Each structure stands twice: as structure tokens, then as C-alpha cells.
Amino acid sequence: MTPIRILLSIFLYALCCSARALGHEKLKPRAGSLEQVTDFGDNPTNVGMYIYVPNNLASNPAIIVAIHYCTGTAQAYYTGSPYATYAEQHGFIVIYPESPYEGKCWDVSSQSTLTRDGGGNSNSIANMVTWTIDKYGADKSKVFVTGLSSGAMMTNVMAATYPDLFSAGIVYAGVPAGCFLSTADEKNAWNSTCSQGESITTPAHWAAIAEAMYPGYDGARPKMQIYHGSEDATLYPQNYYETCKQWAGVFGYDYDSPQETKPDTPVANYETTVWGEKVHGVLAGGVDHGIQIQGEEDLKWFGFA
């Protein structure tokens, strides 16, 4: 082979390797902006996956799954919640799922989403988490989930269907996992009985409903913090008490005998009830369905502050 052909072969080989390297890098979303991921694995209900990877990414980063409200989008929750800003400070990744349905509510009513690996929205969101863990070497012990309104409902469902995937959850103005169950097995169905606070039962019954979503599981479960406005006319305040019952029941706390009640905590007119290390409830006095995310408090619950 002539010298020119040798040099040309070396050049072409180097060019090929560079192209492969660039192609590999494209498999990871760009840092510092909200990016869509379309190839995160099985996605039976066509849920959208958007991700924010901070410029200041930690090694073995934590993950927060932030789930939007009805009428919301991943973009809206990205801009309207503080998690991406905190990601730059603490180096964690934020996953923003997006509902596939008109109206952008989440399916928290069908058997498929209320069952582990059942092929519903919860299944798709869980696959986003496992993809992110694998892609970024994330810390499996620091995966968290939170949401507002319909996203809070889905947060409770994720904690019930995939308790081994999450270490902690925070719900803002939701309902208990399983409360929106559709007897006709409709996806994304509205349940007025639940929304109006008429689905009332015991802590043990609510716990059994959550535990049935992953039959036979007896491992660790995420600690839960529940926020709700006392004047919520969309998802009535009784849903706060029923959600607290559910998680108190799951963890074996005596719902009727909380360990502590703290007025004006974390802010004025909010009352925090502590059933134990794993379950805190926060009733926001005078607040309607538009409850505000308490970002700094979220960081504390998730262990960043």
C-alpha cells in the first residue's frame, strides 16, 4: 500500500470513529435545556418524556419526576415549578412526563395504570425512570416523585405501583391512589364521588387498595408528604384526610393519634401533622386548588437540604 493510501485509510478510520462518538453523544439529551426523549423503552400509552439534565450534573445523580396538572404540559411544569433551577444547584436530573390525552389529565382510573407493569401511564413513567438510571448512572436510592392536582394523583399511583422505584413522594392537591377508579375500566376518567370528597373509608382499607397495586410486595416504600388547600373546591379537602389515612395505613401508623401537630408550619396558616417519619400532612388554611409548590420544603423532604 502506498504512503498516500495508508494516510487516507488512517484519516477515514479516524473520521468513522469520530462519527460514532458523536452519534453516541446524541443518545444523551443536551444539558441545560428541556429535551424530549422518544426512545426510553416500552411506552404502551404514548406518554411524552421530557428531561432536564443540569449543566452541573452530579456523579450518580438523584432524579426527581415532576408530574404536571390537568391542562398542563411538560413545558408548562418545567417553567412553572422550581425543580430545574434547583437541579443546577444540586446536580440532580428532572423528568417531566406529559399526558397523552386531550385535556392533559392523567389516567389514574384504569386497571392498567393502577397495576404494576399493567401497560398504563404509570408503566410508561416507570420506564422513563429506569432509562434515566441506566443512561446516567443515577443513584437508585435517590429517586423521587412529585406532582400537582392530576399530577399529584399520579404521584400517589406511582408510589403504590412502583414503591421500590422511589424513596419519597410529595403530592400537591391530589386524591388517594385508587380513588378515581373507573368501574367501567375507562382510561383518564373523572370520578365525581372521589373529587367531591365522598370516597371515605378506613386507613386499613385505603392501605389495602394501595398495596394491591403491587401484589406480594413487602419491601421498602417511599415516605410521603401530602399538601392540600382547606378551601379546595376542585378536589375537596376531604381528599387530604383520605390520602393521609392511606399512607398512615400503609406504614402502620395510628391515623387517629398523630405524633405531632405543628401550626404555621412550614408557613403561616399551614398546619403540619406528623404521623411518623414516613408520613407528613400539610393542610394549607384558606388556600384553594391553586396551592403553591413549597420548593425549599420539597428539597428538605427529598434530602437535598
Image (tube, rainbow, N blue to C red):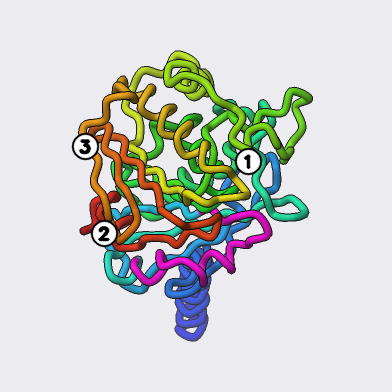
The amino acid marked with disc number 3 is Glu
In this orientation, which residue lies closer to the viewer: 136 or 145? 145
Looking at the image, is mark 1 or mark 3 nearer the viewer?
Answer: 3
Q: Position of residue 68 (x, y in %)?
A: 57, 56
Say which quadrant the C terminus sits in.
bottom left
Q: Earlier in the sequence, mark 1 or mark 3?
A: 1
Q: In the picture shown, does residue 288 fall above or below 154?
A: below
In this orientation, which residue lies closer to the viewer: 131 or 218? 218
In the drawing, what numbered circle is on residue 121?
1
Tell me what residue is drawn at x 59 percent, y 27 percent. Answer: 199
* Quarter residue 275 falls in: top left
Q: Mark 2 falls on what kind of element?
A: loop
Looking at the image, is mark 2 or mark 1 nearer the viewer?
Answer: 1
In this orientation, which residue lies closer to the viewer: 279 or 43? 279
Q: Mark 1 falls on what kind of element?
A: helix
Q: Residues at badges 2 and 3 in contact (C-beta under 8 Å)?
A: no
Residue range in magenta is 67-86
Q: Is residue 260 visible?
A: yes
Q: Earlier in the sequence, mark 2 or mark 1?
A: 2
Mark 3 burial class by Cα count in 10 Å: few <14, some 14-19, many 20+: few
Instruction: Report how far apart the C-alphas of labels 2 and 1 lie in the structure.
Output: 29 Å
Q: On the picture, is 22 further left or further right than 294?
A: right
Q: On the picture, is 188 further left or further right than 213?
A: right
Q: Residue furthest top?
A: 216
Q: Is residue 145 visible?
A: no
Q: Is residue 38 magenta?
A: no
Q: Position of residue 90 (x, y in %)?
A: 27, 65
> In the rendered image, which residue does mark 3 sit on?
260
The amino acid marked with disc number 2 is Ser
Tell me what residue is drawn at x 36 percent, y 47 percent. Answer: 282
In the drawing, what numbered circle is on residue 59?
2
Q: In the picture shown, does residue 302 fall above or below 160?
A: below
